[in-house]
Amino acid sequence: MTIISLPSSVLGNTSFSICCCYSFKYFNNSHHKIFYNYSYSYTKNNNIFCSSFSNFSNLHNFLPSSSFLCLASPSPVMDSSAGQGLYPLHHCKTLHWVRHAQGFHNVAGDKDYEAYKSYDYLDASLTLLGWGQVDNLRKHVQASGLSKKIELVITSPLTRTMQTAVGVFGGGGYSDGVDVTPLMVANVEGSDRPAISSFGCPPFLAVELCREHLGVHPCDKRRSKSKYETLFPAIDFSLIESDEDTWWKEDVRETDEEVAERGMKFMKWLWTRKEKEIAIVSHSGFLFHTLGNFGSDCHQVMKKEICKHFANCELRSMVFVDKGMASSNSPATNFPGKIPNGPDLPSDVAKEKL
């Protein structure tokens, strides 16, 4: 887990930043590694102090916990080097970021950058290797229990991201006697993949704000909304305003700064959602420039963990904390007490009245 969007708390001339990072990455069908890292840093009298601990473990020997840490000003009665703090749970969301698996445009672009400008790769779909990456990430989210925790899956409305999203977080193949709308019909884009059921999985929502760089590259142009609705029937496309793609321009490429700004609009929109644990399937450029807005308050190792480029089908889990009262949801687990009502004057308060 990585904590993001948290400016360092300052007490006198001491400032603290602490992050806990967890990530899963798929490597060449044979290596499955978990990187689990704790690190904190603080400055005092213009001197920088750092501490970190890292552990690498085989996937089958390690299942990540759901606990997380937050930033806060250290209490004067606490050991300041601990750097621990608390935030109300209802002001936090757990976000699971995923970059789509390998697409045909990735293979072509790796050989020749100009291939990204070819209409041969319009709205590129996943390669056979890409589907293998999807299958491996699906095994991970199932084994770790993550699939049971996610309340909503948000996906960019492009074929490769939707294929990745339903392949990783969808309900799997059909069973006899189960009649539900498929998340994906069989053989989309000649993939030779069976239909994927929506049974027993969270809702899926297509959101344009988390698309890749817009313009010039046809691989980043979406098809019509009506076309997608036939290929991915159980994905909710209600937030897509126009049937045709009005965001993508053939001769104008979105700047990095514009992608970052769009990413911040997406992050702000996330707070309008009631769900607390959300998976987001997006693209390398969008993830890099959006998450690059965060982590300046963290140690440089933690900032790199937040902001570095994603590999195909990589998953990183982060805790997003609202410190500005943007979230309006009431706490679901808090209980007010005094039911039934009765005297409850604490002894230390009573002593103050003497």
Image: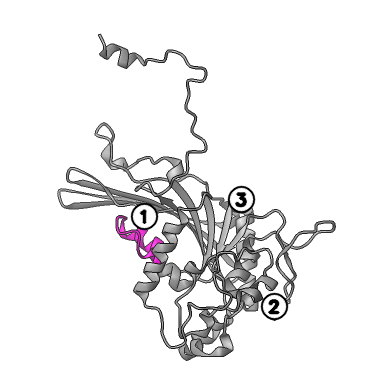
The disc at residue 216 is none
In the figure, is residue 28 to the left or right of 73? Answer: right
Rendering coords of residue 85 (x, y %): 35, 40
Asked whether the viewer can see residue 73, the reply is yes
- Between the residue at mark 2 and the residue at mark 3, the CA separation in whole angstroms equals 28 Å
Rendering coords of residue 22 (x, y %): 47, 55
Q: Nearer the viewer, mark 2 or mark 3?
A: 2
Mark 3 or mark 2, which is nearer the start of the sequence?
3
- Between the residue at mark 1 and the residue at mark 2, the CA separation in whole angstroms equals 39 Å
Q: Which portion, as a residue range, is magenta?
A: 290-308
The disc at residue 145 is 3
Identified at 34% across, 41% down, the residue is: 84
Rendering coords of residue 168 (x, y %): 62, 63
**Against 230, is 319 above or below?**
above
When asked about the image quadrant of residue 121, the answer is: bottom right
User: Are circles 1 and 2 on residues that touch, CB within 8 Å?
Assistant: no
Q: Which residue is mark 2?
A: 191
Q: Residue furthest left?
A: 45
